[in-house]
């Protein structure tokens, strides 16, 4: 009989990973409410996180279970009214959690094929319904007013996609190893390793924020030639971020990126994606996008063109960018030289953009500004933010500022500062 996913990883590593989510990911404080979002198939890991959260002093740990098979049945069989409606009670519970100062931990995994018989149009409609109803919750997420953390575990279908030429058990073991290595959860002291990792972000963020470049110019041999204009007083963040109470947390485990928000109307040129985009449970290959004065004016995908169209046509803001991120091709995660088919991992191996909403945290004092002020500053708003990787081994990035010489920021995919 084939072993289960959690029989193919050591309990010691799982416990370190769970503690990392609690103490570094969301940095649980004493008497804080914690909400864990997890599919039922990951109950083993979710309960380890629950235990770690209580040990860290959590007042209560709410287990918010999902079930992909039930979700699949909903997408296929539910009435159109149900697909287009996200109930008020769902919104109410998120508001109550937010008001109580909850920290959110999301356990994710790819399960390729689970929604293959589902109409992508119905998925898109429901996602738009819940994003609209939970717009205030996602606004708090983007501005770091609540602490949250996203981390991944393998599935058999995901492992087989990444490692197609070995047995399913070997594939899962290999994917566990890659995930734990990328998350820096495979050493003797994961907490200390993350504290050291965070320090490496600080000098680069300070350099970029002090320079306040007008634009960044990205070029490579794959066809990317993209000028990304930056708003005045922009802020590059990365590694750990802080909530309004000054408590540090890491929204993504792993993370290797330094990112900011472009000026909505100042992006021009062509971007050629270098890794597949996973969206609506589908894999989009060979994506290319053309921008003019910030707006996406043309786009193409070798496979998944309709899904790409639904993404970009979600709302007006999904025609513009909300994020530009620098990540080295020479980080430990990138040097694994793997295609993860998962945005959280693939985006952290190379430079990427974010289509859609910008974070107010990428503007000085942005969290205190009104929506009108953020818009006037050049930040984009949208119901979604979807990242697209486009870095390469020969990616060059130049910082441009009027009246100053250009500064080489990245050469051959690696930082030069």
Image (cartoon, helix red, strand yellow):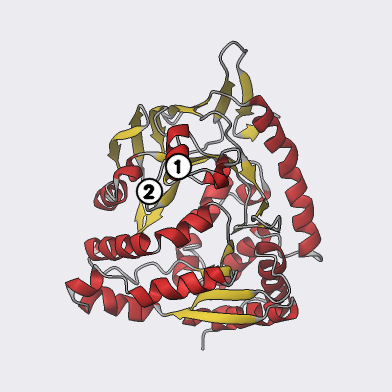
- In this view, the residue in front, 31 or 186, is 31
Query: What residue is at 50 percent from the left and 74 percent from the top?
Result: 96
Q: Is residue 295 above or below residue 8?
A: above
Q: Residue furthest top?
A: 403
- Label 2 sits on residue: 382
CA neighbours of label 1 inside 10 A, class few (<14), some (14 to 19), many (20+): many
Query: What residue is at 34 percent from the left and 69 percent from the top?
Result: 113
- Label 1 sits on residue: 322
CA neighbours of label 2 inside 10 A, class few (<14), some (14 to 19), many (20+): many
Residue 231 position in % (x across, y down)? 51, 30
Q: Residue furthest left?
A: 80
Residue 367 position in % (x across, y down)? 56, 47
* Dots 2, 1 in contact, CB < 8 A: yes
User: For this view, does 364 lie left or right of residue 24?
Assistant: left
Which disc number belongs to residue 243?
A: none
- Name the secondary structure under disc 2: loop
User: For this view, does 46 lie left or right of residue 95?
Assistant: right
Q: Residue furthest bottom?
A: 1
- In this view, the residue in front, 177 or 48, is 48
- In this view, the residue in front, 366 or 112, is 366
- Name the secondary structure under disc 1: strand
Q: Is residue 4 visible?
A: no
Residue 368 position in % (x across, y down)? 56, 46
Q: Is residue 203 above or below residue 57?
A: above
Q: Is residue 413 visible?
A: yes
Residue 287 position in % (x across, y down)? 35, 42
Report the Cα–Cα distance between label 2 and label 1. 8 Å
């Amino acid at each position: 009989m084939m072993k289960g996913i959690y029989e193919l990883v050591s309990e010691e590593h799982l416990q370190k990973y769970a503690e990392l989510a609690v103490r570094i990911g969301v940095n649980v404080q004493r008497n804080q409410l914690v909400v864990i979002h997890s599919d039922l198939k990951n109950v083993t890991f979710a309960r380890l996180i629950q235990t770690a959260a209580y040990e860290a002093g959590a007042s209560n740990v709410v287990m918010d279970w999902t079930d992909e098979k039930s979700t699949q049945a909903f997408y296929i069989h539910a009435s159109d009214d149900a697909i287009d409606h996200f109930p008020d009670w769902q919104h109410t519970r998120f508001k109550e959690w937010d008001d109580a100062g909850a920290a959110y931990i999301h356990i994710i995994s790819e399960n390729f094929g689970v929604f293959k018989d589902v109409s992508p149009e119905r998925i898109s409609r429901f996602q738009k319904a819940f994003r609209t109803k939970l717009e205030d919750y996602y606004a708090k997420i983007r501005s770091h007013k609540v602490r949250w953390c996203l981390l991944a575990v393998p599935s058999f279908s995901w492992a087989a996609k990444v490692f197609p030429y070995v047995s399913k058990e070997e594939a899962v073991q290999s994917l566990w190893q890659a995930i734990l290595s990328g998350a820096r959860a495979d050493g003797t002291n994961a907490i200390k390793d993350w504290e050291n990792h965070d320090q490496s972000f600080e000098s680069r963020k300070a350099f970029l924020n002090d320079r306040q470049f007008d634009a960044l110019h990205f070029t490579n041999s794959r066809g990317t030639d993209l000028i990304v204009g930056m708003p005045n007083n922009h802020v590059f963040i990365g590694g750990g971020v802080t909530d309004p109470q000054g408590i540090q947390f890491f929204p993504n485990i792993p993370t290797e990126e330094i990112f900011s928000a472009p000026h909505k109307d100042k992006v021009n040129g062509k971007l050629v994606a270098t890794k597949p985009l996973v969206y609506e449970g589908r894999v989009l290959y060979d994506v290319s996008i053309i921008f003019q004065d910030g707006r996406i004016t043309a786009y193409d995908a070798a496979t998944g063109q309709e899904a790409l169209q639904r993404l970009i046509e979600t709302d007006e803001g999904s025609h513009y960018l909300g994020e530009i991120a620098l990540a080295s091709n020479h980080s430990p995660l990138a040097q694994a030289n793997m295609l993860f088919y998962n945005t959280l991992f693939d985006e952290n191996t190379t430079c990427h953009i974010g289509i859609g909403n910008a974070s107010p945290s990428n503007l000085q004092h942005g969290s205190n500004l009104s929506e009108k002020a953020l818009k006037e500053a050049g930040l984009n708003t949208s119901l979604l933010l979807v990242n697209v990787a486009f870095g390469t081994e020969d990616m060059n990035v130049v910082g441009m500022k009027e009246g100053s010489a250009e500064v080489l920021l990245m050469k051959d995919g690696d930082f030069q500062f």
